[in-house]
Image: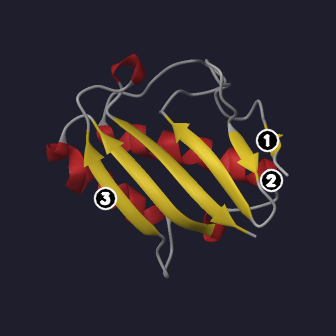
Amino acid sequence: MKQPIATTAAPGAIGPYSQAIDAGSFVFVSGQIPVNPATGTIPSTIEEQTAQSIANLTAILAQAGLSLDNVVKTTVFLADMNDFAAMNSVYAEKFTAPFPARSAVAVRELPKQVLVEIEVIAVR
């Protein structure tokens, strides 16, 4: 059984995918880029973009009755691995120990030419 999760407190899906899928014990949240859902704007720095991406994830998790504390796995996509340390400093402020398992990879390009995209898996 799978149920879609959607909220206007995060950017809407712009393709054939759900913001998140509730699969019972697990919630799979699609990659979130740093678009402010109220204004459609994208911050300029990697720090601001990381914070906005995590805010979007937080809003979607809240719609499912969860929080960042429920996250067990994250994947961080960076347009430039040179931004890793700056992204990591914001990430470390938002997630608490025990930290989720994580992968961080550099990719050639991200939607809307953003610097970061983050997806998560959470558990109930």
Disc with the residue nearer the chain's start (1 vs 3): 1
Write down the residue under mark 1. Answer: 5
Left or right of 64, for residue 86: left
Disc with the residue nearer the chain's start (1 vs 2): 1
The amino acid type, in three-letter code, at marker 3 is: Asn
Q: Position of residue 110 (x, y in %)?
A: 35, 27
Write down the residue under mark 3. Answer: 88
Residue at image coords 53%, 37%? 32
Q: Residues within 10 Å of mark 3 (few under 14, many from 20)?
A: some
Q: Secondary structure at mark 2?
A: loop
Kindly indicate whether the residue at mark 2 contacts the one at mark 1 (C-beta within 8 angstroms). Answer: yes
Residue at image coords 64%, 63%? 122
Q: Position of residue 119 (x, y in %)?
A: 51, 47
The image quadrant of residue 120 is bottom right
Q: Is residue 70 above or below residue 48?
A: below
Q: Secondary structure at mark 3?
A: helix
Disc with the residue nearer the chain's start (3 vs 2): 2
Write down the residue under mark 2. Answer: 64
Q: Is residue 118 above or below residue 112?
A: below
The image quadrant of residue 72 is bottom right
Screen quadrant of the C terminus = bottom right
Query: Is label 3 or label 2 in front?
Result: 2
